[in-house]
Image (cartoon, rainbow, N blue to C red):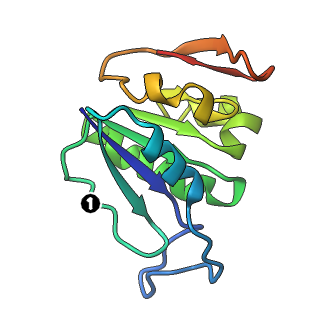
Amino acid sequence: MKVTLIKPNIGRREDSAYVDEGRMEPLQLGVLAALAPPDVEVALYDDRIEAIPFDEPTDLAAITVETYTARRAYEISAAYRARGVPVIMGGFHATLATDECALHADSVYVGDAEYHWPSRSRTRAGVRCGPVTSPRSAWPTPEC
């Protein structure tokens, strides 16, 4: 099983690889990569500094979404979904605008991912995720 983790850029311009100048490491994705079970291969792409290889085989695309990256996250999601790859979105925007994100993903992870990510990273194509309440918070998270 392979999971691809993605940190979207604010947007893309044809004449430039970057739109934003602020570069903080995508630590949340590093934490999720470290928490994945040993038999799950993880790839991590930071759209702010590298091109996303959409045609590289993967079983699941997981995209962290912040409000200012939502538009680009939806573009990335559409590219994966057009290739038949299921997409799960999480992050602040997914937690606060769940219904909007649900229009662009197969599943929306609401709340703190590190509590349930090891089991959820095994999500496979064709599995629908439904809400469940995290034991460590009041936010619902997907039960896959």
Total marks shown come to 1
The three-letter code of the residue at mark 1 reads Pro
Please give the name of the residue rendered at 55% of the width and 68% of the height, measured from the top-left corner: 11
Alpha-carbon neighbours of circle 1 within 10 Å: few (<14), some, or many (≥20)? Answer: few
Q: In which image quadrant can residue 45 be found? A: bottom left
Q: In which image quadrant can residue 122 be found? A: top left
Residue identifier under label 1: 53
Outermost residue, right side: 138
Please give the name of the residue rendered at 34% of the width and 69% of the height, measured from the top-left corner: 51
In the picture, the quarter occupied by the N terminus is top left
Please give the name of the residue rendered at 30% of the width and 23% of the height, measured from the top-left corner: 125
Where does the image place residue 70, in percent across and percent down from the top left?
62, 52
Q: Is residue 47 above or below residue 118?
A: below
Which is nearer the eye, 80 or 141?
141
Determine the secondary structure under disc 1.
Answer: loop
Q: Is residue 106 above or below residue 89?
A: above
Which is nearer the eye, 74 or 8?
8
Q: Is residue 18 left or right of residue 131?
A: left
Which is nearer the eye, 140 or 114?
114
Where does the image place residue 119, in percent across and percent down from the top left?
45, 22
Where does the image place residue 105, in percent across and percent down from the top left?
49, 33
Please give the name of the residue rendered at 40% of the width and 45% of the height, measured from the top-left corner: 78
Q: Is residue 111 above or below residue 51?
A: above
